[in-house]
Image (tube, helix red, strand yellow):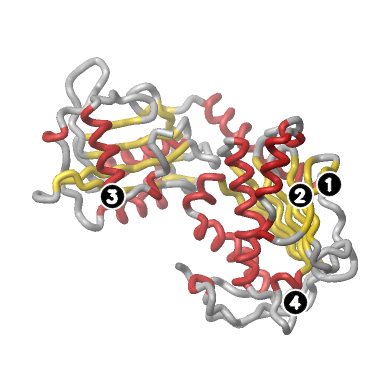
Amino acid sequence: MIFPKHPDVMTEEELFKWAKNLIQLKTPESNTIDYKENVSISNKNKRIEIARDVSSFANEHGGILLYGVPQTEEEVPVPKDISDCGIEIPEQMTIDIENILLDVVKPILPELTIKVIKINPTNQSSLLMIYHPESWGKPHMVEGYNHGRYYRRGNFRTVLMSEHQIEAAYLARKASLQYAETFFESNNFRPIPNDGKFFRVIICPRMALLRKDLMFEKTFRDWLTNNVPAGRRGDWFPFLNGWLFKAYAIGNFYENQYEVRLFHNGAVCFTCDLDLIQTAAEKLYLPKAIEVLQKYVIEILLNLMKFFQISCPLAIDISLHNVKGLELSPKYDQMDFCGYDDPVEAIDTNTIKYTEETSVNEILFSRQIVIHRLMRRLVSSFGVILNPF
């Protein structure tokens, strides 16, 4: 990563030190860093230029646009002294740029970060940073204003993508999605029993990691011991495609309340008796579903990816089984972003299933946004639209 850690979790002081170090070391422009002396969104061409530059990084290996940094006139541009850097950035600028990028670039950039970095508090001098890693949704087109072009990052500038590069990006995305879809359809998740209601979440890396040998070494068995789902009582057992955790708690899923499976490709499958996320009146309780999703699935997944040192796109499959007539609990006091005003309907079908896309980084640094997106899809089955954050 270009940063010591993700910029979404860096403090103002950490961002300032990072930018100061970048400039003082005369770090040259490259295929991941682009310096700009000024920023403007005053007309269509300038807005398109920002969209071109940001999407070019997302379509390639990711990168940073740093506005407020003049460069020397050399063969390879490098920043001038930090005393020469900084611009005044209007208060509304970051929101306006974000809205422009949301409107102009399609599909929407999934992991956009925009930060103002103050470098001289006495005269309000600042830098504007726009960062996007390599996108799991690429290729992104600058579609707005009838522009209709794809860009990638060259060594020191934004360049048009060729036809075969655009085609290759679409094929790579399609192949990774097909890998996940095939995994969801054909793998060993254990059939859902006919008796009882069940909740299942499967998160699959959109590429084959194949850690079969590593999963049976002592280091990974030690990892299993230290990563018991939600600290609950149970045991890990090997199976053909990885490891599974059986809970001691009794329930309707093959006499267990829940089961967690870890696969050789880094996928996680969690299946539970619906009573784990219901109220006493047997209505789905959304805050409990969120808690279970975080503690039993997301925490295990992130720890697994950390162990494997993997950061990649993910596909998430969420499903409810044997749930015709299930109702949604109206109590939302524990999670303030889950309120809603719409009337609630009972589910009119036996199985609800949907798939979402995300990435390890998005879950790690924007977890609440991902969870809200997943829950929005889930409760839409009850005729509910969640209120925004």
* Residue at the disc numbered 3: 12
* Residue at the disc numbered 2: 261
The answer to which of marks 4 and 2 sits earlier in the sequence is 2
What residue sits 64% from the left and 43% below the top?
304
Name the mark nearer the viewer: 3 or 1: 3
Q: CA distance from mark 1 to mark 2?
A: 9 Å
Vertical comparison of 322 with 315: above or below: below
- Residue 107 horizontal/vertical position (percent): 50, 46
Q: Amino acid at mark 2?
A: Arg
Q: CA distance from mark 3 to mark 1?
A: 47 Å
Name the mark nearer the viewer: 1 or 4: 1
- Residue 28 horizontal/vertical position (percent): 28, 23
The answer to which of marks 3 and 1 sits earlier in the sequence is 3
Q: Quadrant of the C terminus?
A: bottom left
Residue 351 appearing in the image: no
Q: Helix or strand or loop: what does disc 2 sit on?
A: strand
The answer to which of marks 1 and 2 sits earlier in the sequence is 1
Q: Quadrant of the N terminus?
A: top left
Q: Helix or strand or loop: what does disc 3 sit on?
A: helix
* Residue at the disc numbered 4: 326
- Residues 51 and 363: in front is 363
Q: CA distance from mark 3 to mark 4?
A: 47 Å
Residues at discs 3 and 2 in contact (Cβ within 8 Å): no
Q: Amino acid at mark 3?
A: Glu
* Residue at the disc numbered 1: 188
Q: Amino acid at mark 4?
A: Leu
